[in-house]
Image: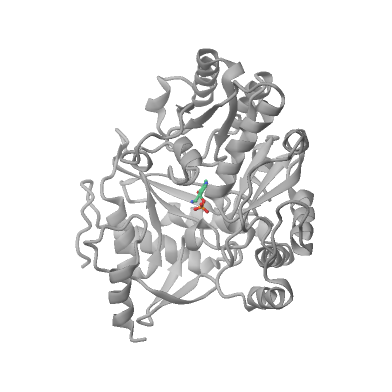
Amino acid sequence: MHRTDLAALDRAHIIHPYLPSSATERVIMVEGEGSRLRDSHGREYLDATGGLWLAQVGHGRAELADVARDQMARLEYFTSFWEFSNDRAVELAERLVSISPEPLDHVYYTSGGSEGNEAAIKMARYYHHRRGESSRTWILGRHRAYHGIAYGGGSVTGFDLYHDGFGPMMPHVAHLTPPWPYRAELFDGRDCTDFCIAELEETIDRIGAQNIAAMIGEPIMGVAGMVVPPDDYWPRVAEVLRRNGILLVLDEVVTAYGRVGTWFAADHFGVRPDIVVTAKGITSGYLPLGAVLVADHVATELGRDHGFPMGYTYNGHPTACAVALANLDIIDREGLVERAPKIGDFLAAELRRALADVPLVGEVRNVGMMLGVELVADPTTREPLPGIQHIADTIRAEHGVIVRDAATALVLSPALTLGEAEATRIAESIAEVLSRTTPDGTVHRGA
Ligand code: PMP
């Protein structure tokens, strides 16, 4: 089909998330290899977002296509409801349990992260219900958190954008302050973790521990701008929750499968969650799949009586599980978990070097291959820079480097296979555009 027809047809027929219908531009990708993409006009791009933060092994791995083809030819799909299962789902569960933090030894499959958060919320409430504590229905989250866009997880998500206009959200959700050291104004002059822990304890007192099922949090907050908490935040949160019988659910949809330099961010922060929600990197995006990892004490309750009354048609999809296994094989074989902090720190260092003279940069932060470049109109007041989306669009349009804006930062999460020359190109492209951006967010024309 002619390339202009594709754009016109897209405009006519596809509802894109977060795109006004007045927007005419379309970038229609047709090919990918490693961190390179090519659009329908033959233009090449460097993918610094790793798709949507998931392309651990990079684009275009023919090996994964072969695995999907072979599996489809053998058994494309069968249900995992009731007593039915399939060999690939079983093999993958064994593999996930072997790499997951203790005490997670059960797996509940989904097709993505939003479904996983719905499952986690229901699991947490049902766990307490089965234990005779049906009053434990409240879910604690944080402002600026992102837990997908379904109703439960979407309610715990902490941005008004995802709530306003959608009618009543799920009741019994409380949002806490995000652990964001750079935004010191959030903590009334106190230490970030001390403030967050005091607020957590006050919130538990106010709602009553006997009414709270779980706290859900991203170990590193992605949509908030790759916000990295202080090292003592998660261990101290976990201790408070445990003391109050509240489950800890980590939303590792972005952080799992090597992105932060360990298989799971729970390992990085040294915490033992009761439930971990994963998706994205489990297949590097080659097929939709998610896995909720569940500790034995929770799984035991879910398994009582008639079992856990929640199932998705695609639970344990054999082809998606086969591709996930092969994806984990590649991550293992190529040492990508160990590579993530090395190339991630290299990219962060290149960004700091290239951006050293750009006053609009508040900080460059990263854990492994999750990176945020905080942009401020004024480094003294730390007033956020307006128009960050336009800056991201300009970097793509003028340098062919795809980065995204998230709230107050540019965010990067490239494939774990990214090369050093590619990292340098990303850093220099960002720096070039920011060097001609003024504090009102205007990007001036290049010389
Ligand atoms: N949780 C987190 C932390 C995420 O970043 C995302 C997606 N960006 C989700 C949940 C939702 O996942 P999905 O889009 O696969 O439903």
- Classify 191 as above or below 88: above
Q: Residue 82, percent across and down?
A: 74, 51
Quadrant containing the N terminus is: bottom left
For this rendering, which residue is in front, 308 or 323?
308
Name the residue: 49% across, 21% down. Answer: 195
Above or below, 138 against 434 in this view is: above
What is the tally of numbered marks visible in this picture? 0
Q: What residue lies at 65% left-to-right and 64% top-to-bottom?
A: 320
Q: Quadrant of the C terminus?
A: bottom left
Name the side, left or right, on which 170 lies relative to 122. left
Q: Residue at x 56, y 15 (%)?
A: 208
Q: Quadrant of residue 336?
A: bottom right
Q: In the image, residue 70 lies at what x, y percent?
A: 71, 77
**Drawn side of residue 247 relative to residue 227, left or right:** right
User: Which of the colour schemes (rainbow, by chain, secondary structure, one colour) is used?
Assistant: one colour
Compared to residue 349, the image places residue 121 above or below, namely: above
Q: Position of residue 371 (x, y in %)?
A: 49, 51
Horizontal placement of 191 versus 394: left or right? right
Residue displayed at 66% across by 78% down: 69
Name the side, left or right, on which 446 lies relative to 420: left
Residue 258 image offset from top left, x and y in percent: 64, 54
